Image (cartoon, rainbow, N blue to C red):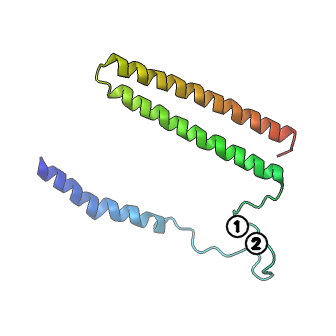
Amino acid sequence: MSTNISKAKKLIHRVALPAMLAAPLLVSAGPQTPQNTASFDPGTLVTGTGVFESTSITGTIALVIRFALGFLGIVIFLIFLLAGFEYATSGGDEDKSKKATSRMVNAIIGLIIIFFAFVASNAILGFVFSQ
């Protein structure tokens, strides 16, 4: 049994770990150069870099709302996964399984609420502020 574990550790150390460390080098796009290097002025913002370039307050508010709702969706999904793990490991205990089921239902309700908040915020920002 311990020999299988040591063989697995050796495999991870010799093959998998170096492959994971070398993967970013294999898919690299190479060095990036700015689009307008010939007319670079230190007082101007270089465009096309992928950096958030909006200066309007509505654009900033839209970005914050979308980020916050996306983050909350991820948190609620993780809560759902944790409740599923608790349900799977309850071992037949009715109290634990009811508690885990209740958490899963609440997480689904939370995801539905966040989905409708996301739809509503996109509709309001799209129709009122033209974002």
Q: Label 2 to label 1, Cα distance in Å?
A: 7 Å
| Residues at discs 2 and 1 in contact (Cβ within 8 Å) | yes
| Position in image of residue 99 (x %, y %) | 42, 22
State the count of labels.
2
Amino acid identity at mark 1 = Thr
Position above or below: 127 against 62: above
Residue under the point 48% across and 26% down? 104
Q: Identify residue for label 2.
A: 46
Q: Of helix, strand and loop, which one carries label 2?
A: loop
Residue under the point 48% across and 34% down? 79
Judge from the rendering whether residue 23 lies leftward or rightward of residue 120; answer left or right.
Answer: left
| Disc 1 packing (10 Å; few <14; some 14–19; many ≥20) | few
Residue that protrudes farthest toward the bottom in the picture: 38
Position above or below: 53 against 78: below
Quadrant assignment, res 91: top left
Quadrant assignment, res 83: top left
| Position in image of residue 109 (x %, y %) | 58, 25
Along the line of sight, the residue nearer the viewer: 15 or 97: 97
| Position in image of residue 31 (x %, y %) | 59, 75
Judge from the rendering whether residue 76 lies leftward or rightward of residue 131; answer left or right.
Answer: left
Residue under the point 77% across and 52% down? 60
Residue under the point 54% across and 39% down? 75
Q: Identify residue for label 1.
A: 49
Q: Of helix, strand and loop, which one carries label 1?
A: loop
Amino acid identity at mark 2 = Val
| Position in image of residue 1 (x %, y %) | 12, 46
Q: Which mark is residue 59?
A: none
